[in-house]
Image: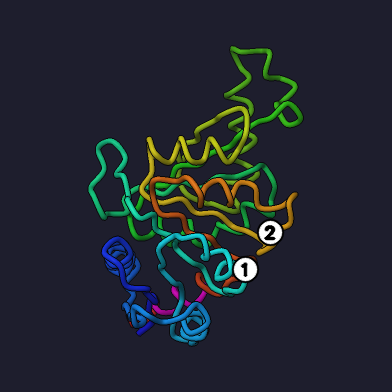
Amino acid sequence: MTDILVRPAPTTEVIAADLARSLRLGTRYTPKDASDAEFLDALDDPDVLMGVVGFDDDVWWLLQHARDPLVLVPAVVTPRPGGTPGSIERVLLPLDGTEEAARAVAETAGLFHTAGIELVLLHVFDERTVPACWDQSAHAREAWETEFRARFCGPLVPHPHPEITLCSGEPGEHVVEVAARVADLVVLGWSRRLAPDHARTVRAAVDAASVPVMVIPVRARLCSVISDSAATGE
């Protein structure tokens, strides 16, 4: 049996239970007074695939050192309109239009899709990335979406026509706002680098999101191990 490691709290236990049910995983709990270092040691167990913790000011140490995904749960989780409290039914996948970003979440997206969880893609334009064709309003979005799906949704997130939400402006702000409207969980890949010019979207989402945020470090082993477990019925 492969497990989700949970730092006990009312909100983390609810979210971990739903993820375990959807992904066919077990759960194990650390003592409430376990230190961050002890939690990280437990997370390194080969049979633990991800951790679920509450967000506080010290969680960034865990994020920087964890080699497996962490689901960060706000102290108060606000369900999206029409959502079921404590249930992960819709997942937001922000993509910045690079293959690196798509690869970071592609396998996890496949797992959620296989579990029957709806995927919503988000792309945020800025003044540097808005397509040149965008001033031709009759065809701009259709042409852009066709190319975007072909480059990212097909080979990297291969699911039938996931919804794409488009915004313009600061990515982190839009991740928070869109998640509150349409999602129960946000999935973000990151490099574990917290220099001033890095991780701005991750910082914004973790600091302000009203729903849990799954942060996946580059080269995390989550997806292949879950896939093997599902295939063998473990």
How far is disc 2 from disc 1 in space, using C-alphas? 8 Å
* Residue at image mark 1: 64
Q: Nearer the viewer, residue 35 or 140?
A: 35
Q: What residue lies at 53% left-to-right and 35% top-to-bottom?
A: 174
**Which of the two discs, 2 and 1, labels the residue nearer the N terminus?**
1
Q: Is 75 part of what is drawn in magenta?
A: no
* Residue at image mark 2: 194
75 to the left or right of 14: right
- Colouring convention used in this rendered image of the protein: rainbow
SS label for mark 2: loop
The quadrant of the rendering that contains the N terminus is bottom left
Q: Horizontal and vertical percent for residue 97?
A: 67, 42
Name the disc covering residue 166, or none.
none
How many C-alpha atoms fall within 10 Å of the one at disc 2: few (<14), some, or many (≥20)? some
Q: Horizontal and vertical percent for residue 10?
A: 26, 64
SS label for mark 1: helix
Q: How many marks?
A: 2
Does 26 sit above or below residue 208? below
The quadrant of the rendering that contains the C terminus is bottom left
- The amino acid on which the numbered mark 2 sits, given as a three-letter code, is Leu
- Callouts 2 and 1 close, C-beta under 8 Å: yes
Does 194 sit above or below residue 136? below
Predominant secondary structure, magenta span: helix
Residue stretch rendered in magenta on the structure: 224-230
Q: Horizontal and vertical percent for residue 68?
A: 54, 73
131 to the left or right of 166: right
Q: Horizontal and vertical percent for residue 232?
A: 37, 82
